[in-house]
Amino acid sequence: MSTNIKQLTPAKAIHPGEILNDELKYRGISQQDFSLETGISKTILNEIIKGKRSINADVALLIGKALQMDAKLWLNLQNNYDLDLSNIKEKTRRYLEATDMWNQIKEYVPYKFYKKCKVISGNPVTDVLLVKEIYNVSDITALAAVYKQPKYAHFRKSGKLIPDKINLIGWVNVIAFEAKKVEVDVFDVVKKDELISKLKDVFRENTETVSRTTEILSNYGIKLIVHKNAEKCAVDGVSFWSEGKPAIGLSIRHQRIDNFAFTILHELAHIFLHLINDVNAQFINLDKQALEQEYIESKEEKEANDFSSSALINNDEWKVFIADNSIYQAHKVDQFATRLGVHPAIVYGRYSNETGNYKIKANIDKKLN
């Protein structure tokens, strides 16, 4: 959007006396001679040139006649100076007020994270308004109340992992803010299996996976927002409703195809099984060490985990495969993955997730491409 130059506030207001002084120097006229020629006292002329006195209508006529210029020019210069000065003072006032407000707001937002990711600009005037929009609040009191909402109560401090509540909620809210800007096609819950089938092909091929996944989800009416997570914020994903459409937020903090696939399916499970019946719900997928055991064992989380695993690898097929320890034989893993049409990293990922054994060496590229 273009900026109207008439709406810009100059950094400095230029007094017409400064312009008059430049004009006199250019013409080689001393202040004393100009005072004698116009009848303007030296004191008044000097004060005008130093910007300590305004040019009124009488003085404008005298200057205009002596320099053979339109008197309206000098009145306009004075009016513009007065307006610019007023605008600068108003801008300064707004800046000081915004700075004061920002110093209070900073306590409740992940300032360093937002600055690093260029969510905010560093200008308190625009940043205060933006933060209110991101958190959907009207004042600081409402911003503080955000942290008391029940949907953010399902994580705890751990000896191994201490999630930063401000960073976590800041991440979730910026995902929701970005999601509002995204347009997608019509969402149809009936097309669940068709969607999953197309996603499995993308995961298996693992080429331009994120962009292709985003496009497929968009075609099926689901928004996908990817945003790096903040420090001490072990969040993998979040699912919620955005402007009448389901939305998924991902951090992709592990950069592995198996983790990406499982997380996408986990969030899709929440959409198809839970969000479809509750437009106000929100599900945050954190590292297990950062969640309360009650939340991990909740009906919704168990259903999402089961959905994610079985959507990628059929449960009956899986039981047969691991029964004879085939997971330790690379060629059998490749054969199993090929037969089911999944990336072999997903096979290893499911086993590790279920058993906690992440030490199996596999000569495959797990990197998300």
Image: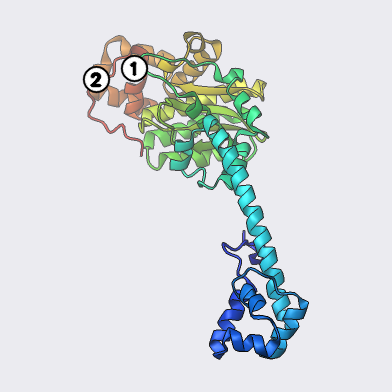
Q: Nearer the viewer, residue 249 or 366?
A: 249
Kind of residue sitting beneath label 1: Tyr
Q: Is residue 82 above or below residue 287?
A: below
Q: Quadrant of residue 223?
A: top right
Secondary element under disc 2, as helix, strand or loop, is loop
User: Residue at label 1?
Assistant: 351
Position in image of residue 268 (x %, y %): 53, 26
| Picture disc at residue 360 | 2
Split into 4 quadrants, where in the image is the C terminus?
top left
The label number, if any, that marks residue 150 in the structure image: none
At 48% across and 39% down in the image, what residue appears? 114
In the depicted structure, whether residue 350 falls above or below residue 226: above
Q: Position of residue 43 (x, y in %)?
A: 64, 76
Given residues 366 and 110, the one toward you in this image is 110
Label count reads: 2
| Label 2 crowd (10 A; few <14 / some 14-19 / many >=20) | few
26 in relation to 219, above or below: below
* Amino acid at pointer 2: Ile
